[in-house]
Image (cartoon, grey):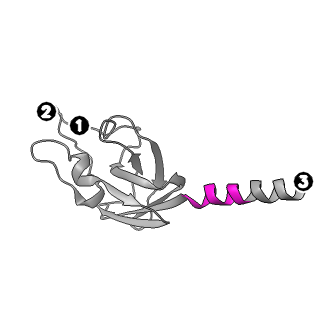
Amino acid sequence: MTKIITIIVLFICSIISAQNVKLTVAVSGLKNNTGVVKVGLYNSDGTFLKTTYKSLSSDIKNNKAVVTFTDLPAGEYAISTYHDENNNGKMDKNMMGIPSEDYAASNNAKGFMGPPSYKDAKFVIGKDSKIEIVL
């Protein structure tokens, strides 16, 4: 009986872990190797560009950076990223509120007179994936 319960538990664990995916984000087009690249992952329209679901940062080598999110539930996400040149932990803006550090979003989403929308930046992952973003 113990063997049967153990087998069932292992089977359930394997099903649950099979639903988690890995997402690698490669950021290129950086103008220099100074500072770090910050990558924010969002899982809903309501939190997009407000509260990250997960976030990572990466050093820059050869004007490129790579981060990998692990153990993500399969589903819908969007990404925003920026080059934190002065490594102060925030996106710098000019006096008019316009970002003064390079930034981008997944799907190369662009905003008109403002930030990009979740609708334009969202994507669905169901297996291990890689996304490339050019600043």
- Tell me which amino acid carries mark 2: Met
Nearer the viewer's eye, disc 3 or disc 1?
A: 3
Residue 21 counted in the magenta span: no
Residue found at the far front of this picture: 1
**Residue 1: where, in percent of width, then height?**
90, 54
Residue holding disc 1: 93
Crowdedness near tag 3: few (<14), some (14–19) or many (≥20) residues, C-alpha within 10 Å:
few
**Residue 133: where, in percent of width, then height?**
32, 62
| Measured Cα–Cα span from mark 3 to mark 1 | 61 Å
Q: Is residue 106 left or right of residue 18?
A: left
Q: Is residue 131 above or below residue 75?
A: below
In this orientation, which residue lies closer to the viewer: 12 or 68? 12
Residue 16 counted in the magenta span: yes
Quarter that holds the C terminus:
bottom left
Nearer the viewer's eye, disc 2 or disc 3?
A: 3
Q: Residue at x 15, y 48 (%)?
A: 111
Q: Secondary structure at mark 2?
A: loop
Q: Secondary structure at mark 3?
A: helix
Residue 44 appears in which quarter of the rendering?
Answer: top left
Kindly indicate whether the residue at mark 1 contacts the one at mark 3 (C-beta within 8 angstroms). Answer: no
Q: Residue at x 52, y 60 (%)?
A: 22
Q: Residue at x 47, y 49 (%)?
A: 57
| Measured Cα–Cα span from mark 2 to mark 1 | 8 Å
**Residue 96 circle label:** 2
Work out whether mark 2 precedes mark 3 in sequence or the reverse, and give the earlier one. Answer: 3
**Residue 55: where, in percent of width, then height?**
46, 45
- Tell me which amino acid carries mark 1: Lys
Work out whether mark 3 precedes mark 1 in sequence or the reverse, and give the earlier one. Answer: 3
Q: Is residue 25 above or below residue 116?
A: below
Kindly indicate whether the residue at mark 1 contacts the one at mark 2 (C-beta within 8 angstroms). Answer: yes
**What's drawn in magenta, residue-wise?**
11-19
Residue holding disc 3: 2
